[in-house]
Image (cartoon, rainbow, N blue to C red):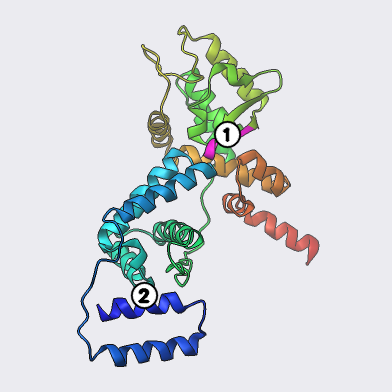
């Protein structure tokens, strides 16, 4: 109880004292309080204070445009943290969160990237509490970004893409591969497309990305031809752009496409065939051919250009050529 009382007082005094004065205050409180027996009293916080504040935070994120999928991830992450700590959110301190992140990583054997994602969500939540004057200072301020190893993410080669196209057993799978490869759209965006969304004359379509943001993506002539052939051969009336191969011809789901692509990759012995790899391949190819990063950012629907740069891996062979041109 003494430790919590000291930490609470110090947090409230943060805006007014420098580091040396804070240290003196901490030492003085420890010396004085050791002569007293301290018992807790009702702080005036409701029992459901945590849930009330969490709901208010998620409501603010919803107004900002976060998708329901993102909000669900936020809720699960924060509820897990609060349940593990077993404290009122206003009494959570930096060491509590450091210990929680360490224990979480050890218990779940998760990557540093996953831990940093949790840290970012905690930071957003406690920063909101600070902005709304529920706490004096966010306890996440002193928990820095988790350093992760930089690795070159794999992309498909031109040969990989041609082999996948040549080994498609039906027009639907061929059209799906062409669509992913030429547009760079997210798989979640593609499964939501309807026939009427496709403009064959302009070779473009409108997709709804993260946060329900609308943008235009473009496809090439080959995709246009294969997509038209696929649609002309369909017998169903489903408005969805891509449907199952058998009756009742329902809209395809993300899991269905992922499974289909894995089967194709296994058959051709191509490593890690999944939808997102098409997006990364397009980004890398675009940068490699000189597409301005700002235009690629818009094409991919990224809010921050840093995200676009993470997708685009520059080929080492071109780095060598550039070195010879500008330096060697």
Question: Quadrant of the image for the C terminus?
Answer: bottom right
Is tag 1's residue or tag 2's residue first in the polypeptide sequence? Answer: 2
Q: Residue at x 66, y 41 (%)?
A: 298
Q: Residue at x 61, y 20 (%)?
A: 198
Residue 202, by quadrant, is: top right
Give the Cα separation between the discs numbered 1 and 2. Answer: 55 Å
Observer-nearest residue: 166 or 22?
A: 22
Q: Secondary structure at mark 2?
A: helix
10 Å crowding of disc 1: few (<14), some (14-19), many (20+): many
Observer-nearest residue: 219 or 89?
A: 89
Question: Quadrant of the image for the N terminus?
Answer: bottom left
Q: Secondary structure at mark 1?
A: helix
Judged left or right of residue 3, residue 278 is right
Residue 35, by quadrant, is: bottom left
Residue tagged 1: 181
Residue tagged 2: 8
Judged left or right of residue 51, residue 65 is right
Q: For residue 252: magenta? A: no
Q: Position of residue 36 (x, y in %)?
A: 22, 87
- Residue range in magenta is 208-215
Q: Position of residue 52 (x, y in %)?
A: 35, 50
What label does residue 96 carry, if any?
none
Residue 114 visible, this orientation? yes
Observer-nearest residue: 30 or 118?
A: 30
Q: Residue at x 49, y 26 (%)?
A: 192
């Amino acid at each position: 109880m003494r430790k919590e009382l000291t930490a609470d007082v110090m947090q409230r005094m943060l805006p007014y004292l420098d580091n040396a004065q804070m240290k003196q205050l901490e030492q003085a409180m420890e010396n004085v309080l050791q002569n007293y027996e301290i018992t807790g009293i009702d702080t005036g916080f409701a029992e459901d204070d945590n849930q009330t504040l969490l709901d208010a935070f998620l409501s603010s994120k919803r107004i900002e445009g976060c998708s329901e999928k993102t909000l669900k991830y936020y809720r699960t992450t924060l509820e897990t943290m609060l349940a593990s700590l077993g404290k009122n959110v206003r009494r959570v301190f930096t060491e509590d969160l450091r210990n929680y992140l360490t224990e979480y990583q050890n218990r779940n054997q998760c990557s540093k990237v996953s831990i940093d994602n949790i840290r970012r969500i905690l930071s957003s939540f406690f920063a909101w509490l600070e902005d709304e004057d529920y706490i004096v200072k966010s306890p996440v301020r002193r928990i820095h970004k988790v350093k992760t190893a930089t690795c070159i993410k794999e992309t498909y080669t031109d040969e990989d893409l041609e082999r996948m196209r040549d080994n498609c057993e039906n027009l639907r799978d061929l059209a799906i591969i062409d669509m992913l490869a030429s547009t760079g759209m997210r798989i979640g965006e593609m499964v939501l497309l309807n026939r009427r969304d496709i403009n064959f004359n302009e070779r473009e379509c409108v997709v709804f990305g993260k946060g329900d943001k609308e943008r235009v993506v473009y496809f090439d002539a080959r995709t246009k031809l294969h997509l038209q052939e696929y649609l002309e051969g369909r017998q169903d009336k489903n408005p969805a752009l891509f449907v199952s191969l058998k009756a009742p011809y329902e809209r395809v789901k993300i899991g269905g496409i992922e499974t289909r692509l894995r089967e194709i990759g296994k058959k051709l012995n191509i490593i890690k065939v999944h939808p997102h790899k098409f997006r990364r391949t397009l980004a890398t190819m675009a940068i490699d051919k000189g597409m301005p990063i700002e235009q690629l950012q818009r094409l991919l629907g990224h809010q921050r250009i840093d995200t676009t740069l993470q997708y685009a891996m520059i080929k080492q062979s071109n780095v060598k050529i550039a070195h010879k041109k500008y330096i060697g």
